[in-house]
Image (cartoon, rainbow, N blue to C red):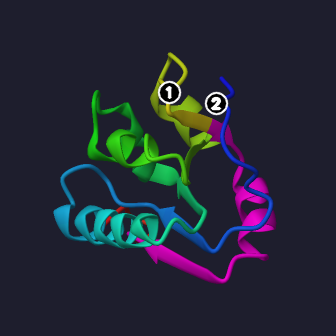
């Protein structure tokens, strides 16, 4: 499922989220950073990886409301998503790969990561 978004070749901020739903600290911190950056209208790439993709499975999530602003591109890791979900993610979440995320993150002004290998 491809979602039309602004050109995300060069990001001012790239965010990697590995936090599981319910690990409020990492999820909340990432939401706060995304909201603050979005107010500055800088392009933001938010990539959900590992257990973090389950944050995209929540209907009407706070992430979806942030993406509606236009400067935030939400992507889920295709491999992580396929391990956990049957249906493709709903808009505004798109599907990408971890390799594509890092290709974009290399050009980012700032890269931030929330959550750990075990999703906390």
Determine which quarter of the picture holds residue 115: bottom left
Q: Residues within 10 Å of mark 2 (few under 14, many from 20)?
A: some
Task: Kindly give the residue lying farthest to the top in the view shown.
Answer: 87
Q: Quadrant of the C terminus?
A: bottom left
Q: What's drawn in magenta, residue-wise?
A: 95-115
- Percent position (x, y) of residue 37? 44, 71
Kindly identify which residue carries mark 1. 91
Q: Secondary structure at mark 1?
A: loop
Question: Would residue 109 appear left or right of 74 to someone viewing this image?
Answer: right
Question: Would residue 54 appear left or right of 2 to someone viewing this image?
Answer: left
Question: Would residue 105 appear left or right of 80 to someone viewing this image?
Answer: right
Question: Would residue 97 appear left or right of 49 to someone viewing this image?
Answer: right
The residue at 35%/64% (across/down) is 35
Kindly identify which residue carries mark 2. 3
Q: Is residue 110 magenta?
A: yes
- Percent position (x, y) of residue 71? 55, 54
Q: Secondary structure at mark 2?
A: loop
| Camera-side residue of 30 and 80 | 30
Q: Is residue 72 above or below residue 68?
A: below
Residue 78 appears in the rendering: no
- Percent position (x, y) of residue 33? 37, 73
């Amino acid at each position: 499922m491809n979602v039309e978004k602004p050109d995300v070749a060069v990001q001012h901020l790239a965010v990697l989220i590995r936090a599981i739903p319910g690990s409020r600290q990492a999820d909340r911190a990432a939401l706060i950073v995304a909201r603050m950056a979005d107010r500055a209208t800088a392009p933001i790439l938010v990539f959900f990886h590992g257990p973090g993709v389950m944050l995209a499975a929540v209907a009407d999530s706070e992430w979806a409301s942030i993406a509606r602003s236009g400067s935030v591109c939400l992507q889920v890791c295709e491999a992580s998503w396929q391990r956990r979900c049957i249906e493709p993610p709903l808009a505004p979440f798109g599907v990408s790969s971890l390799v594509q995320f890092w290709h974009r993150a290399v050009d980012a002004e700032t890269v931030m990561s929330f959550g750990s290998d075990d999703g906390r």
